[in-house]
Amino acid sequence: MLSAALVVFILLVPLTFAYGAWRAAPWVPSLRSTVDRFLPLAHIHPGQTVVDLGCGDGKLLAAVVAQGGIAIGFEIALLPYLIAKIRGRILPEAQRQRYFVYYKDFWSADLSSADVVFAYLLPRVHQRLRKKLETSLKPGTRVIISTWPIIGWRPSVIDTRPGQIKLYSYQR
């Protein structure tokens, strides 16, 4: 017989996936090739802070700390959040100290310390995201958006590769 905690966990996981999809986007794991394309666009220097809005399993965050950056991720789907937490715990100590994952809705997060922001969200939330970023980010912050552009912003770079999603890089 299943324990009550396991039953709650089994029921809770799909609900958190649905909530995340409703709030901003369903979880779609980033491909390693997308992470590899993100890194040169981000121009991460040691000590810079990179924020991933909906960090999923933390793959991008781990790449950021490997480059010397400080990685902050927000995730509200329970299973990817737990995977991201585990990923952070198995990093080398020096990287682990710069890897932060929060089980939190990024809409209420303070983004003012970000040097780079990454988001892979549905286009239906881009106008709200645009307003949040315009009021939250310091001048010079790089914003990298996956798949769909932010209407009203002019990208400085559009990374296109055959058969892969587009990455739009903006400078605030």
Image: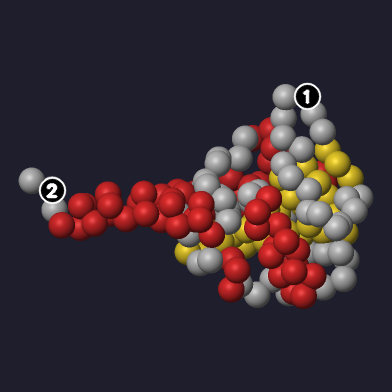
Q: Position of residue 37 (x, y in %)?
A: 76, 38
Q: Name the outermost residue toward the left.
A: 1
Where does label 2 land, which residue?
2
The residue sitting at 58% across, 56% down in the picture is 24
- The residue tagged with tag 1: helix, strand or loop? loop
Q: Name which residue type carries label 2.
A: Leu
**Contact (CB < 8 A) between labels 2 and 1?**
no
The residue sitting at 64% across, 35% down in the picture is 32
Where does label 1 land, which residue?
162
The residue sitting at 21% across, 52% down in the picture is 6
- The residue tagged with tag 2: helix, strand or loop? loop
Among numbered discs 2 and 1, the one appearing first in the sequence = 2
Q: Position of residue 140 (x, y in %)?
A: 88, 66
Image quadrant holding the C terminus, namely: bottom right
Q: Quadrant of residue 129?
A: bottom right
The residue sitting at 81% across, 54% down in the picture is 151
Residue 112 or residue 19, whichever sits in front: 19
Instruction: Give the alpha-carbon distance from disc 2 to disc 1, as whole Å.
Output: 47 Å
Residue 151 shows in the view: yes
Q: Position of residue 71 (x, y in %)?
A: 65, 59
Q: Quadrant of residue 157?
A: top right
Q: Position of 14 compared to 33: left or right? A: left
Q: Position of 24 compared to 40: left or right? A: left
Residue 25 or residue 3, whichever sits in front: 25
